Amino acid sequence: MFMAVYIIAEAGVNHNGCLDLALQLCDEAKVAGADAVKFQTWKTEKIVTHAVELASYQENNISDKSKSQFQMLKELELSYDTFKVVKEHCDKIGIQFLSTPDEIDSLDFLYSLGLPFIKLGSGDVTNIPFLRFVGSKHVDVILSTGMSYLSDVDLAYHTLLEAGATSVTLLHCTTNYPCPMQEVNLRAMQTLRDAFKCKVGYSDHTIGLEVPIAAVAMGAEIIEKHFTLDKEMDGPDHKASLNPDELTQMVNSIRNLECALGNGLKQPNESEKVISEVVLKRLVASVPIHKGDILSAANMTVKRSSDGAKASLWDLVVGRMATKNYEIDEPIII
């Protein structure tokens, strides 16, 4: 499904319920070079009760601590018609529109838009009825796995496939905004790959760039990272997000790292072959050598030279008879 690392610029709810901000986020994701810009689509009444409390990170990151989670989400909710406008804008500027559905109606809506895959959030890893409905759409699925035990992921992964999902890619994730370094546990991404023999990636909530870049070095095929227009805006995710310049830096760093990872073959590059002609050591005479002398450590040494037998041939040359006279530092020819 992915040739290069697929970079998802996670706009999430950083539009603060405003269409203009959502469109600006799409523009910045495009400028940064991301492959996709992703939002979240839901009907608040269908995903949360009026009584549920704010998550700790939500309470820490919003100014009005008196709000319920229901109130906060309702203010951040965008309509389907608004998302149609956002998708049309993405199509126009040339970036893939994505959004995570949080309930069945929103899944049906996003499916109707012809998205290349469905991205599911960590909150639905244990939502078996919803996972079955997603799988029944016979689509590729990307599933974040925050807050999960390996057994939870195992059940979700196989539920999706058994319901008809054409493929499942798993993203390691820590559901904390921002995520402290000691809670990242990047090696869990490799555990997912080993356990399920599937494509894996990383959805990042840390502050900074080093962790998603490290994830690519460890084999992530998808990177998802929150970004915002302004980290000082009010809202649950802004503080754990990159600004547009940082997003651009992350994308460029990942592309450079992809290039640096190479093909894995251990062999000289073309540039090294040229340099090796004057850097790799060769056999030269350490004292004057006369034709007929036996070549040995007594009359040969190893130095950088533009000609002569390679130093790796030492054992093959020692004991041979010199076929010509050599001056000091003259390359030994065989």
Image: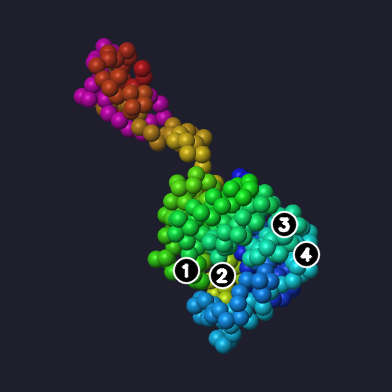
Viewer-nearest residue: 101 or 264: 101
Q: Earlier in the sequence, mark 4 or mark 2?
A: 4
Determine which residue is flagged by label 3: 111
Q: CA distance from mark 2 to mark 3?
A: 27 Å
Are the residues at dot 2 and dot 3 in contact (C-beta closer than 8 Å)?
A: no
The picture quadrant where one finds residue 266 is top left
Type of amino acid under label 3: Tyr
Q: CA distance from mark 4 to mark 1?
A: 32 Å
Q: Earlier in the sequence, mark 2 or mark 3?
A: 3
Task: Give the percent coordinates (x, y) of residue 165.
Answer: 63, 49
Q: Earlier in the sequence, mark 3 or mark 4?
A: 4
Type of amino acid under label 1: Cys
Q: Residues within 10 Å of mark 4 (few under 14, many from 20)?
A: some
Q: CA distance from mark 4 to mark 2?
A: 25 Å
Q: CA distance from mark 3 to mark 4?
A: 12 Å
Type of amino acid under label 4: Lys
Q: CA distance from mark 2 to mark 1?
A: 11 Å
Task: Give the percent coordinates (x, y) of residue 284.
Answer: 32, 26
Are the residues at dot 4 and dot 1 in contact (C-beta closer than 8 Å)?
A: no
Determine which residue is flagged by label 1: 179
Q: CA distance from mark 1 to mark 3?
A: 31 Å
Determine which residue is flagged by label 4: 84
Determine which residue is flagged by label 2: 241
Q: Residues within 10 Å of mark 2 (few under 14, many from 20)?
A: many
**What are the residue bounds of the magenta stretch?**
291-308
**SS under mark 2:** loop
What is the count of numbered marks?
4
Q: Residue at x 54, y 55 (%)?
A: 156
Instruction: Name the side, left or right, on which 260 lies relative to 308.
Output: right
- In this view of the protein, can residue 42 be seen by the observer? yes
Task: Give the percent coordinates (x, y) of residue 109.
Answer: 74, 62
